[in-house]
Amino acid sequence: MAEIIRHNPAAVHAPSSGYSMGLELSQYRRLLFISGQVPENSDGSVPEGFEAQCEQAWRNVIAVLAAAGLGVEHLVKINTFLTDKSQVVPNRAIRRKMLQGHEPASTVMIAETVDGKWLLEIEAIAAE
C-alpha cells in the first residue's frame, strides 16, 4: 500500500473538517482516477433529496474503488461539485460517515451539473 503522509502546516489555516491540506504519496504501486460519479442508481434512477443523492454518489465512488480492489482508505484526493451552498454542511457530514475517519485532500466547488436532477458530482483519485 502507498505510504501516505499528511501535511497540515501551521502556516496554513487548519482544515475545517474531514480532509487534509496535502497528502504526499511514496512507495505507491498504482493510481486509480475515478470519473465524476453522479447520484444515479444502477437502474438510472435518481434518489430524492440532497442527502440521499450524496450517499448514492459516494456508494458509486466506493463501488469503483471496490472494482479495483481498493477501499476508501486508498483515496488521496476528492473533488465534490455541489449545486448550492446550502449543501456544504450536509455534504461534510455524509463525507465523514462514508470515509470512516479517512481524510484525503479535498476540494468542494459550487457548480452546475450536466443534468439538473443531479445535485452533486464526486470525482476522486486513489493510490495503493
Image: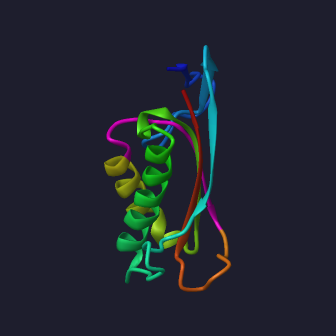
- x, y (%) of residue 78? 57, 47
Asked whether 105 or 57 is in front, the reply is: 57
Tell me the quadrant of the picture where the C terminus can be found. Answer: top right
Please tell me whether residue 14 belongs to the stretch shown in magenta. no
In the rendered image, the residue lying farthest to the top is 27
Residue extent of the magenta highlight:
99-110
Residue 48's place in the image compared with 63, above or below, is: below
Task: Name the residue rendered at 36%, 70% in the picture.
Answer: 51
- x, y (%) of residue 92? 42, 54
Q: Which quarter of the picture shows residue 66?
A: top left
Q: Which quarter of the picture shows residue 69?
A: top left
Q: Which quarter of the picture shows residue 30?
A: top right
Asked whether 108 or 70 is in front, the reply is: 70
Please tell me whether residue 102 belongs to the stretch shown in magenta. yes
- x, y (%) of residue 6? 53, 23
Asked whether 104 or 68 is in front, the reply is: 68
Task: Name the residue rendered at 59%, 48% in the picture.
Answer: 124
